Image (tube, rainbow, N blue to C red):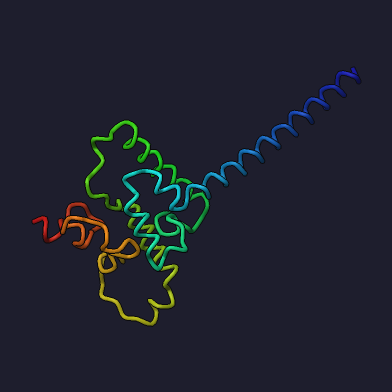
């Protein structure tokens, strides 16, 4: 009976050790994947994003990663969940619904919320010292930051965006 208990303890210890090692490998691999998919090298690997990553490289924000602006940065869990949803959408469009990719790519309301919060977080000191008009979004006024006007876009792209999809820009009316 003693030998049986000893063997069970040894097996339990080995399985526990193996589980911990697998957990560490998955955690490190997941973190490395999240970091590797943050930057313009990855984002620009889809042809529809090439003009955006090219203009971004010429901007004052070029030292940042795409997801420093385009994903929540308040917690690793929020960032990972956001990127998982966005990644699933991108995979769907690029592999299943290619004909549905819009001619003009615009941020969705969840992205606008993350972008605005990241603008506020990075530019807090400036925002305290400079008066601003009340707008729905930072990109209502700063639409060309950081991607610039160098990308060929229809005129309505430069109209202010609204978080509420029911509100149409002036040029679309």
Question: Residue 118 occupies which quadrant of the picture?
Answer: bottom left
The image position of residue 165, as x and y in percent, is: 21, 52
Q: Is residue 25 above or below residue 111?
A: above
Residue lying farthest left?
A: 173
Classify residue 4 as left or right of residue 82: right
Q: Residue at x 25, y 75 (%)?
A: 133
Which of 152 and 127 lies nearest the eye of the viewer? 152
The image position of residue 80, as x and y in percent, is: 48, 47
Q: Is residue 169 above or below residue 13?
A: below
Classify residue 157 as left or right of residue 89: left
Classify residue 13 as left or right of residue 105: right
Q: Residue at x 90, y 19 (%)?
A: 3
The answer to whether residue 37 is seen in the rendering is yes
Residue lying farthest bottom?
A: 129
Q: Quadrant of the N terminus?
A: top right
Which of 72 and 91 lies nearest the eye of the viewer? 91
Classify residue 89 as left or right of residue 22: left
């Amino acid at each position: 009976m003693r030998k049986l208990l000893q063997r069970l303890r040894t097996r339990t210890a080995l399985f526990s050790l193996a589980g911990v090692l697998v957990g560490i490998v998955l955690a490190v691999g997941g973190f490395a994947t999240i970091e590797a998919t943050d930057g313009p090298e990855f984002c620009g690997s889809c042809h529809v994003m090439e003009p955006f990553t090219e203009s971004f490289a010429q901007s004052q924000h070029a030292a940042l990663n795409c997801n420093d602006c385009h994903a929540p940065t308040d917690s690793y869990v929020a960032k990972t969940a956001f990127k998982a949803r966005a990644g699933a959408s991108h995979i769907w469009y690029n592999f299943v619904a290619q004909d549905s990719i819009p001619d003009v790519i615009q941020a969705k309301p969840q992205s606008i919320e993350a972008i605005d919060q990241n603008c506020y977080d990075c530019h807090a000191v400036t925002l305290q010292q400079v008066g601003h008009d009340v707008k729905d979004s930072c990109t209502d006024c700063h639409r060309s930051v950081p991607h610039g006007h160098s990308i060929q876009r229809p005129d309505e792209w430069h109209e202010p965006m609204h978080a509420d999809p029911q509100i149409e820009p002036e040029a679309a009316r």
